[in-house]
Amino acid sequence: MNDELLVVRCQLGEREAFTELVGLWHVPVWTFVRRMLDAERADDVVQEIWVAVLRSLPRLADPSRFAPWLFTIARRTVLDRLRREYTVTETPGGATETPTEDLAEEVADRTDLIAALASLPTLEREILILFYLEDLSIADCAQICEVPAGTVKSRLYRARRLLREHLAEKGCQP
């Protein structure tokens, strides 16, 4: 069953259709959020995302554009969380907490890649995740991030360069 039909069924009030939609999209949404935040915060943020989806789904005008719409909600929710935490957790010296990875669960090269990804600025990190890891098109990334396609391309270029530089500093083959 395709997303468009599930969305229409949800908009008609079928509760099991929403359950199916969540079942299809929970892992991709959680993966996106997890790559932007640590695991502890990811679960809470994903729950916030699904609540927002449930509330807003009746107003989705084009059910065929569900995926970009969903990731737009996910992106905004993540950025809202980061903004709230930044204002609360900033220390007097300017240092902020950075998420740590569980190194025991990851192989060395994957750990280096994750660390390199986490070191990128938020805008570049989210573009890499959306484009490469969530396999969205440049047009969809542009819609989700509310920027022109050219901006997506320049962020991708900058993100790849920064990622390459970070991996080279660590002695990894980019």
Image: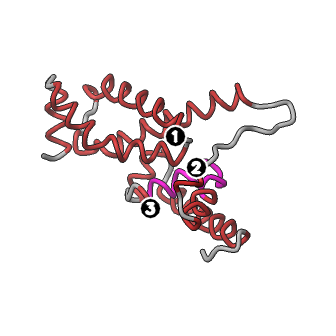
Residue 168 image offset from top left, x and y in percent: 69, 73
Q: Are marks 1 and 2 in contact (CB under 8 Å)?
A: yes
The amino acid marked with disc number 2 is Asp
Residue 102 is marked as 2
Q: CA distance from mark 3 to mark 1?
A: 20 Å
Residue on which disc 1 sits: 39
| Identity of the residue drawn at 17% across and 37% down | 6
**94 falls in the magenta region:** no
Q: Secondary structure at mark 3?
A: helix
Which one is in front, 59 or 129?
129
- The answer to whether marks 3 and 1 mark residues whose Cβ atoms lie closer than 8 Å is no
Q: Badge 1: how crowded within 10 Å, few (<14), some, or many (20+)? A: some
Residue at horizontal 27 percent and vertical 36 percent from the top:
22
Where disc 1 sits, the SS reads helix
The label nearer to you, 1 versus 2, is 2
> Picture coordinates of residue 83 (x, y %)?
63, 32
Look at label 3 and name its amino acid.
Answer: Tyr
- Residue found at x 44% / y 38%: 74
Give the residue number, with chain letter if any, for mark 3.
132
**Along the polypeptide, which appears first: circle 1 or circle 2?**
1
- As drawn, the label of residue 82 is none
Q: Which residues are magenta?
A: 117-131
Quadrant location of residue 169?
bottom right
